[in-house]
Image (spheres, rainbow, N blue to C red):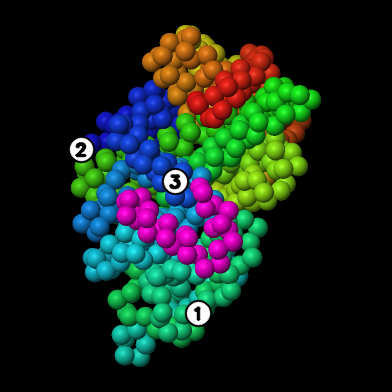
Amino acid sequence: METLEDVKSLAGGEFLVKDSTNEMVFTNEDFTEEHLMIKSMAAEFVDKEVVPHVLTIEKDKTFSIVLDLMNKAGELGLIGTAVPEEYGGMGQDVITGTIIAEEIGRTGSFAATVICHVGIGTLPILYFGTEEQKTKYLPNLASGKWLASYCLTEPGSGSDALGAKTTATLSADGTKWILNGQKMWITNAGFADVFTVFAKIDGKEFTGFIVEKGTKGLTLGAEEDKLGIRGSSTRQVFFENCEIPVENMLGERGKGHKIAFNILNIGRYKLGNAALGGAREAFNQAVKYANERNQFSVSIGTFGAIKHKVGEMAIRLFALEAAANRVASDIGKLEHVLSAQGKSFSECLLGAAEEYSIECSISKVFGSEVLDFVVDETVQIHGGMGFSEEMGAARAYRDARINRIFEGTNEINRLLMVDMLLKRGMSGKIDIMNSAMAVSKELMGIPDFGAGNEGAFGEEETALKNAKKSILLVAGAGVQKLMQKLKDEQEILMNVADMLIDVYAMESLLIRVRKIYENKGEEASGLYIDILKVFFNDAIARLNFNGKEALQSFAEGDELRMMLMGLKRFTKYAPVNTKNARRRIAESILEAGHYNL
């Protein structure tokens, strides 16, 4: 029976306690020829069909442009990649889906429409629908003839999805479900043909249902006046004695949480790639403006302050590429393993996404925050013009903000990733306890790990190994000191989550640069090594800061001093001339006129 070891992959969360090899981690450089062809097709669609209309889309209250573009995307197969061919889709792999998400992610409002439709709109039916439901709905959803929406959030239940008040009652003759309630912040609601709705049967059993447009008792509120993604539809959805056929229950009765939470995992890793696309688009706008804008008779791109911004944006973009594609590939590999073990179609991807739920949250948080950083710096590089709606920077800035709220807020995702890691450690699924004990022995002067690594990246490999120890030190001490109370200390959990994100990004980046170095040689890898060293330099500093914040929250006296000394030992890295490194990166990109890494 095929296992994760056979496909050279670690289990979810194991990156903290085990080393990953080059063979284990997929990077952009591993895209197949087919992947690159699809990327090119998606990019051409975005450049020719969507980008010319992005500002008009914001002002089109009829959504006619968006609907036309959805039809075109459907004709090209861009919104049916996850749907099997027997239901009218393309049946493509996970990486293909994230490649398309990245390109579509460049389009702001249109991206919100597409990602909602192909993700939380379509996937519940694909993975939890009956054969009759799949046959009825999926072909039209895959083609873009019908559009989908997802109704989970209510005025009184956001992150607490199970606190929903919408009810479903079986009719006296047993042929219909009668829905009553209210949903809010529903993307695509204004033009959706199919709604996935969550309600509690008799106010108790949280369950999914399929509701079609035009159903009596289904009404919509006015379009929301939003900060960003103004060209997407967002409305409240009301159900007043809304009658649907009994066969429109989705999944098992009382098991709606399985649909809601599993679909969100898939949405999270895809959002990381979509954020990457949005960040790349904004970055290219910033580079273009930096080259064209003159002050004091020279291009502002020649100024050190601007080079710093361009260099740092590029570093974070490159690291995000490495992390986001690593998550998607691991999910795809496990999906293949589960399929070989005889699992059903739905069990494969859902099981894979659940296994890597920690990494899905990392991709979502890291991606959305890199995007926010990039769009903010893009506005700053544009100066006064960045504050004007005349330029694309203002729209990108507004559109980006929702991503830290979509698919569970970044705060919720930080708590989830640490909670899942600790649960897997306590259950023995991940060997965190022995690893944390080894770190404790090392702090007490009993060596448990070998000497530093050697070779071209020995310094970084050693720094990464020690960075992982810093997390084990902080999390292990927190568990030992606070026990069950740790779950209520959200500030400490946030610190640990930020450390996890940095370590995952560090390892993903290291492996990507190491593979480039081995393929291209030292001379051709100079800029990538610059990226690696600057990111490591800054990430190590953040690890020290977050570790110190956490330790000082629950320890004191000699115990605290000893742990702080250990943290300092685990967060060391040789000094780097980050100014010159960022300048070299920026100068290469400014000369090319776009992101060229």
Q: Which residue is drawn at 27% across and 50% down?
A: 90
Observer-nearest residue: 108 or 236?
A: 108
Residue 60 picture location, percent across and down = 55, 63
For label 2, the crowd category at 10 Å Cα-Cα, with few meaning under 14, some 14 to 19 and many 20 or more, is few
Task: Using the rendered image of the protein, determine whether residue 597 is visible from the camera's viewpoint.
Answer: yes
- Against 559, residue 137 (above or below) is below
Q: What is the distance, in whole Å, between disc 3 and disc 1 at their CAs?
A: 36 Å
Tell which tag, 1 or 2, sits nearer the viewer. 1
Q: In this view, does 487 lie above or below 382?
A: below
**Quadrant of residue 334 within the rendered picture:** top left
Is residue 62 shown in magenta? yes
Query: Looking at the picture, how far across and down is residue 379, in whole percent?
Result: 69, 41
Q: Magenta stretch?
A: 51-79
- In the structure shown, which secondary structural element does the residue marked by tag 2 occupy? loop
Q: How far apart are marks 2 and 3 (CA)?
A: 47 Å
Q: What residue is disc 1 on?
A: 219
Residue 188 is at least partly visible in this image: no
